[in-house]
Amino acid sequence: MSTQGKSVADRVMASVGGWLATHVELIFRIARNTLPILVVKYKGKRFALVTRFDDVAEVLGRPNVFDVIYAPKIRVIMDGDNIFLGMRDVEQATRDKTTMRMTAPRVEAMTRVKPEVTALAEAVVAKAASAGRVDLAMELTQDVTTRFFGKYFGTPGPDVKTLSDQARLLFQYMFADMADDPALDARARPVAAALRAYVEGAIAERKNARGIHDDILERCLQFQDLGLPGMDDRGIRNNMIGLIVGAMPQAPMLIPQLFDILLDRPRELAAAQAAARADDDVAVSRYVFEASRYYPLTPGLFRDATEDYRLAAGTWRSRTIPAGTRVMAATRSAMFDGRRVPKPSSFRVDRPDYTYMHFGAGMHECFGLYMNREMVPAICKAVLKRPGLRRAAGDAGRLKMDSIFPMSLVVEFDS
Ligand code: HEM
């Protein structure tokens, strides 16, 4: 029987979901060791939870068997169109990702992202120095990433708050709305329309001011001049919106979360601070991404099986994932799988890059991968350099979340 429109099964699932969320590490450990490929049926639909490193990598490495689930939401945001994030391994996906990669050459992670993000982050922390405290979420990371990417993309938005709020809502709609909440859909549609109108306006405006700016929008228009397929105004608009939603919300999620870990580990915090003060950027990066392993962006990435597929074939744990199954490739669990990640419970700064799945893997690996590797440590370093770094007293020093988004975590330091 149901009360208030919810069946007993729904309520049980909701409380199981809540419990799972707070015991995620334990659940993953049990799953990895007992049922590493777990397939269940709920309300006539199949779900699979994949928790071992090798199996997560296999799922993410088969983009045509395990298809990304984002296309329906992308079509709402892009007024009927799709972008490479929402596609299987088809020609258009390769074409568009290749073109967009050429608008943001890898070398600029070092020549542009790192110095400009460093300057912005240093300025925020310097401004906060008189008060001796800074909020790592909105005041620092959201501000820096929105300003930096607004300039680098050529789409600064009406103002920092409007653009970052729009990006965050659309990110939630696209990546974290598994239940297809009608209320969120109703909020997302007008925001998507406003962002489309803004980017269309930015493209039109830029056509009257060519050759002045050196940013991704200008480079897209240069490719349009050359007649590259996919670079008509609508294609540029869609890919720019993809970048805005893909780039702006994540560092402000990752950075407060990783500080929440570091601030509780005095030894590692001291070592990370020493590295920051010694300008040992490689070491800073290692501390930062290892801390993120304990509190990554997401527990996993979702895919839909398009055909029956035998996962981990030839092993005792192999299971057939039937077509139509929604699969969670638990990247967070994979990063703690001792079969591939030595001493997974230890905080170590000598792990090889391939240990980390912070930025996905396979065909849909993050477009901003190389930017992130410079941007995230650069923002953290500006804070880590400060002496006497600690949580602010009381509530302010606790990480506050609004669903999946860190909204504040205040730290204090000696000015
Ligand atoms: C700390 C920052 C970031 C994190 C943690 C992050 C994480 C991720 C992850 C996990 C994926 C894979 C999604 C999947 O496979 O389902 C992804 C894809 C993507 N990211 Fe990022 N990202 C970050 C920053 C950025 C930036 C700065 C940009 C743009 C400049 C960006 C643009 C994209 C795009 C366009 C995709 C889709 C790639 C494709 O489908 O081929 N991300 N990101």
Image (cartoon, rainbow, N blue to C red):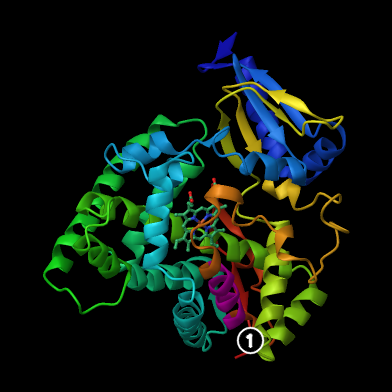
Q: Badge 1: few (under 14), some or many (20 or more) residues near its Cα, within 10 Å?
A: many
Give amino acid for label 1: Arg
Q: Residue at label 1?
A: 386
Q: Nearer the viewer, residue 95 or 212?
A: 95
Where are the magenta residues, as a range? 372-382
Q: Residue at coordinates 68% horizontally, 70% vertically from top-left?
A: 288
Q: Residue at coordinates 22% horizontally, 58% vertically from top-left?
A: 227
What secondary structure is the stretch in magenta mostly built from? helix
Quadrant location, the C terminus: bottom right
On screen, residue 191 versus residue 247, left or right, reads: left
State the residue lying farthest toward the left. Answer: 208
Residue 346: % across, % down:
86, 62
Q: Residue at coordinates 51% horizontally, 18% vertically from top-left?
A: 4
374 magenta-colored: yes
353 magenta-colored: no
SS at circle 1: loop
Q: Nearer the viewer, residue 271 or 341?
A: 341
Whether label 1 lies within 8 Å of ligand 1 gets the answer no
Visible in this render: residue 78?
Answer: yes
Q: Nearer the viewer, residue 401 or 309?
A: 309
On screen, residue 265 versus residue 138, left or right, reads: right
Q: Residue at coordinates 49% horizontally, 37% vertically from top-left?
A: 177
On screen, residue 256 versus residue 22, left or right, reads: left
**Location of residue 132 by image quarter:** bottom right
Residue 210: % across, % down:
17, 73
On screen, residue 369 versus residue 334, left or right, reads: left
Residue 124: % across, % down:
47, 81
Residue 332: % across, % down:
70, 49
